[in-house]
């Protein structure tokens, strides 16, 4: 199934006002229902290299060896081939970043966050590492919901009751991540599924947005510009820069225009395409 006419995707990234370079990297393939966002670790070497390697690994492997159904079948903890693919893609990306980090002294220790979204059969599966986020704006309720859970010291402190979510907004520990792609040979990847309904809008973003722009403002912006996602993306980036722009900021907005049930699996469809 080609999702080009089903999913509308608008992506935008900004260096911000204080960083010398943009260490965020974004990519998407509308026909395949895939979107990827990575935020290279600013405190490490070559964060921009790490994020680009991660995203390109996901997208370049889309038609390749990740479709080995026997290998995916070994991942029995997942409910679907698509969820297994998301996990496999993220772990392969981790290997790619780690290998590059070992190739040059000035790449040592580099890392990146990762959010990968795969749309199929009226749902989306998300593979997530770090503090970049994936949100869903429900069309019927008009409410914005964070689907991913940050892998940060701050989130752990919230979970332990040290901070309330409101107190956490003023914390200086926002950017201390507990997981990053490419730092170690192995990585723990969170896999999350959620339903997709017509006119729902989904947002992938780096912490350059959610650190500076409140969820209420994000919800209002996306709701206001729900029929003009390019304007929504531009407004979100501008709000982050207006609030100081101390970090790179990236957003990918995805709107579902119609149902997309599948009679055959996502894997079977892609296998058919690449046998043509």
Image: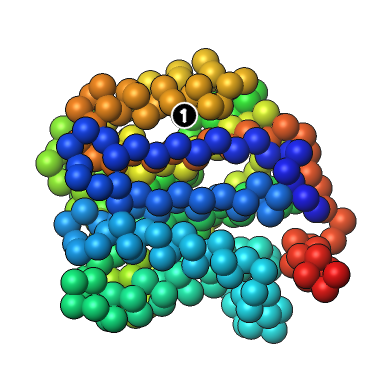
What percent of the width, then of the height, locates residue 150? 34, 50
Left or right: residue 139 compared with residue 16: right
Few, some or many residues within 10 Å of mark 1 (<14, 14–19, 20+)? many
Residue found 87% across the figure and 56% down from its top? 263
Q: Is residue 44 left or right of residue 201?
A: left
Q: Is residue 238 above or below residue 189?
A: above
The answer to whether 129 appears left or right of 226 in the picture is left
| Quarter location, residue 60 | bottom right
Q: In this orientation, does residue 152 appear?
A: yes
| Viewer-side residue, 96 vs 142 | 96
**What is the basis of the colouring in this image?**
rainbow
Tell me residue 156's x, y (percent).
Answer: 25, 53
Q: Viewer-proximal residue, 254 or 47?
A: 47
Mark 1, secondary structure of its residue: helix
Q: Which residue is mark 1?
A: 233
Q: Is residue 168 left or right of residue 208?
A: left
Asked if residue 167 can be seen in this view, the reply is no
Q: Residue furthest top?
A: 224
Q: Position of residue 228 (x, y in %)?
A: 58, 21
Measuring 40% from the left and 60% from the top, which residue is drawn there? 52
- Residue in view at x 49 percent, y 67 percent: 57
Q: Residue furthest left?
A: 172
If the image is split into quadrants, where does the C terminus sit? bottom right
Q: Does residue 203 lie above or below 31 as drawn?
A: above
Total number of numbered discs in the rendering: 1
x 40%, y 51%: residue:
25
Dividing the picture into quarters, in which one does residue 10 lie? Answer: top right
**Residue 102 appears at what percent x and percent y?**
27, 81
């Amino acid at each position: 199934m080609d999702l080009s006419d089903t999913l509308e995707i608008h992506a935008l990234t900004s260096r911000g006002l204080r960083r010398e370079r943009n260490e965020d990297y974004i990519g998407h393939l509308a026909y395949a229902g895939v979107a990827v966002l990575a935020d290279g670790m600013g405190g490490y070497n070559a964060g921009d290299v790490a994020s680009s390697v991660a995203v390109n690994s996901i997208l370049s492997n889309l038609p390749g060896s990740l479709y080995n159904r026997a290998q995916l079948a070994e991942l029995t903890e997942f409910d679907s081939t698509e969820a297994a693919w998301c996990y496999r893609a993220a772990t392969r990306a981790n290997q790619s970043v780690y290998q590059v980090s070992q190739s040059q002294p000035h790449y040592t220790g580099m890392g990146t966050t990762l959010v990968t979204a795969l749309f199929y059969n009226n749902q989306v599966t998300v593979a997530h590492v770090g503090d970049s986020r994936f949100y869903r704006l429900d069309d019927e309720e008009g409410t914005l919901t964070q689907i991913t859970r940050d892998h940060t010291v701050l989130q752990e402190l919230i979970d332990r009751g040290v901070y309330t979510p409101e107190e956490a907004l003023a914390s200086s520990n926002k950017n201390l991540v507990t997981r990053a792609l490419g730092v170690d040979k192995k990585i723990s990847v969170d896999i999350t599924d959620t339903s997709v309904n017509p006119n729902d809008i989904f947002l992938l973003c780096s912490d350059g947005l959610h650190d500076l722009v409140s969820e209420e403002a994000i919800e209002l912006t996306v709701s206001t510009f729900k029929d003009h996602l390019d304007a929504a993306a531009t407004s979100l980036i501008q709000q982050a820069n207006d609030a100081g722009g101390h970090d790179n900021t990236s957003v990918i907005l995805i709107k579902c225009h119609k149902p997309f049930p599948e009679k055959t699996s996502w894997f079977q469809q892609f296998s058919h395409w690449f046998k043509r």
